[in-house]
Image: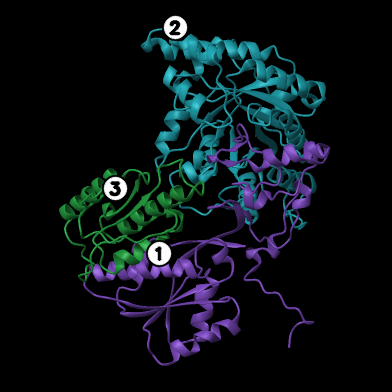
Amino acid sequence: MKAGSHLEKMFAAGHFAVTGEMGPPRGADAGHIHEKAKYLKGMVESVNVTDNQTAVVRMASMAVCRLLLDMGIEPNLQMVCRDRNRLAIQADLLGAAALGIKNVLCLSGDHQKFGDHPQAKNVFDIDSMQLIATCKKLRDEGKLINDHECEGVPQYFIGAAVNPFADPFDFRVTRLAKKIEAGVDFLQTQCIYNMEKFRTYMQQAYDQGLTEKCYIMAGITPLKSVGMARYMQKFVPGLEVTEDFIERLKGVDKKKQGDEGIKMAIEQIQEVKEIKGVAGVHVMAIEWEERVEEIVTGAGLLPRPEIS
Amino acid sequence: MRLNYPSNIKIINVPCTGRVDILHLLKAVEDGADGVYVAGCLEGDCHYVSGNLKAKRRVTYVKKVLEDIGLEPERVEMYNLSAAQGTRFAEIAREFTERIRELGPSPVGSGAKAA
Amino acid sequence: MVVAESKPIEEILAMVADFDKILLTGCKGCVTVCNAGGQKEVGILASALKIARKKEGREIEIEEITLERQCDPEYIDQLEEPIANDKYEAVVSMACSVGPQYIAKRYEDMLVFPALNTTFIGGSLEHGVWAEFCQACGSCGIHNFGTLCPIARCAKSLLNGPCGGSAGGKCEISPEIDCVWHLIYERMSRLGQVDKMANVVMFKDWTTSRDGGPRKIVREDLKQ
């Protein structure tokens, strides 16, 4: 065991794992977190807590992670390189460990250009690859980036994100391999709306033996409407939505598109479950936490296995 | 052809409108011209390939400068006509004079007229 | 070269609003090459300022002078004569921001204003178009990236790109900006060096960059 988190144990026991995600509020209301998180409790192994997602200021990920722990929910601390330099990153990593946070997700972070403070100075002192290496070094060597030994070595189950749909496609699996080399334990993919490309990607990863070296979780986001699908298709760089997704949503009454989206998400989970090397699913129901139960149930993943 | 055009127009000859610089246009305004226009060859007919297109871009630049400092950009204009279009030349001269008359004297004005 | 662009005229007009006599100084260095602060641009700005002030009924007297370079003290000395006899209330410099700082240092009692926004270290892509190529990190490693700089040209300065926002060769922040990591991948492929991209590039030492404090180069062999 690297950190002994619940998520890690589920993987180790060979279970098909499920993680969820929630965005902290744009304010100091802790009640909001309880409200959202209660829908995820018992549905997933652990919950990603975003870190100033899309460069919009929100309550600190670490604080929300601690609140989740208090609720009996295991958090995955997301950490981006956009807002902190290596001093702050390491300080936060040490603090997170002290608060009992065991899963860390290392990300570069969306550029602030489209966030709510586009005037901000970004940091990017280190990148996501180096952030993974930082966590690993802290954990395995008990040392900071500068080789200073830590008093009290933190334990992390190290995660990161991969996007099989960004360009250049031929380099994407190599980049996944780089994250493994840097020290990642589990990976969550970008939302999948191009199953063919995802299959090709996973096949390459499998053929190169990479799926033996880390746990790869397929990213699933239920589509709420044709509008949402079109928006993602046109305006989210590095995200691909094939026409069959849109056609299927178009085929039902507007009021029923949400239900259809949930149904499609369930089918996707069943589909990715059969792909070699997929160790779990990461369900990102953006502002739709209350429907997670339906998705997980529909996919036959409830109840979640008990594990000690 | 003895065509009449307004006498307030002062003509400055250049070998090609490509020779007209941003500064020439600005200086005319600075020295009190109420309006300045460049009469170039028809687009695609420049003897030096792109002189008139360059002039057009410079006119656009000067319009932007005038706008930035609170002067009407319409006081500067680019026209295209061929050397054979004498009637058109007189027409443009009347048209532009009329436009400037409507705008009124330039607030920069020191008495000097047109260019 | 250092690439700069003119500040909005309104901003410059506000800077000189209190003055009736100014000295407008251009520079024959980089800013002449990038058409921002050479002799020609000095003439255009002077004319535009004069037009604006005439319009307000309060004329401004502007002397134009374009120095060989404003980033060298010996050329700044050429302003001695126009400045010495107290003829001007302020100096407006059309050099990169080094120029106005040099002038202010040399003429301690003179008010000095920048007319340009110094933008980046770059080059021209075509006539009238310039782009950033270098961020002066002080420790060049572009040869490791297909001779393309990820620090200056990647929006996130990633050393292990491309990130998940790279789409169709373009950066996630704008379809107008090339994803430099896509270019790096293409070039490394052409050179048969893609395998090098499989190595994780570790932490960059930023001490040679601005992060190490204002920088200075001393060449003992040249010092007098």
Badge 2: chain ID = A
Q: Which residue bears the numbered disc 3?
A: B89
Q: Which residue bears the numbered disc 1?
A: B23
Badge 1: chain ID = B
Q: Nearer the viewer, residue A57 or B84?
A: B84
Q: Identify the secondary structure beneath mark 1.
A: helix
Does residue A238 appear to the left or right of A132 in the view shown?
A: left
- Looking at the rendered structure, the kind of residue marked 1 is Leu
Colour given to chain C in the rendered image: purple
Scheme of image coloration: by chain
- Looking at the rendered structure, the kind of residue marked 3 is Phe
Comparing labels 3 and 2, the label whose residue is closer to the camera = 3
Percent coordinates x, y for residue A14 in the rendering: 74, 19
Badge 3: chain ID = B
Q: Identify the secondary structure beneath mark 2.
A: loop
Residue B115 is drawn in which quadrant? bottom left
Instruction: Specify whether residue A16 is in view.
Output: no
Residue C171 is drawn in which quadrant? top right
Q: Identify the secondary structure beneath mark 3.
A: helix
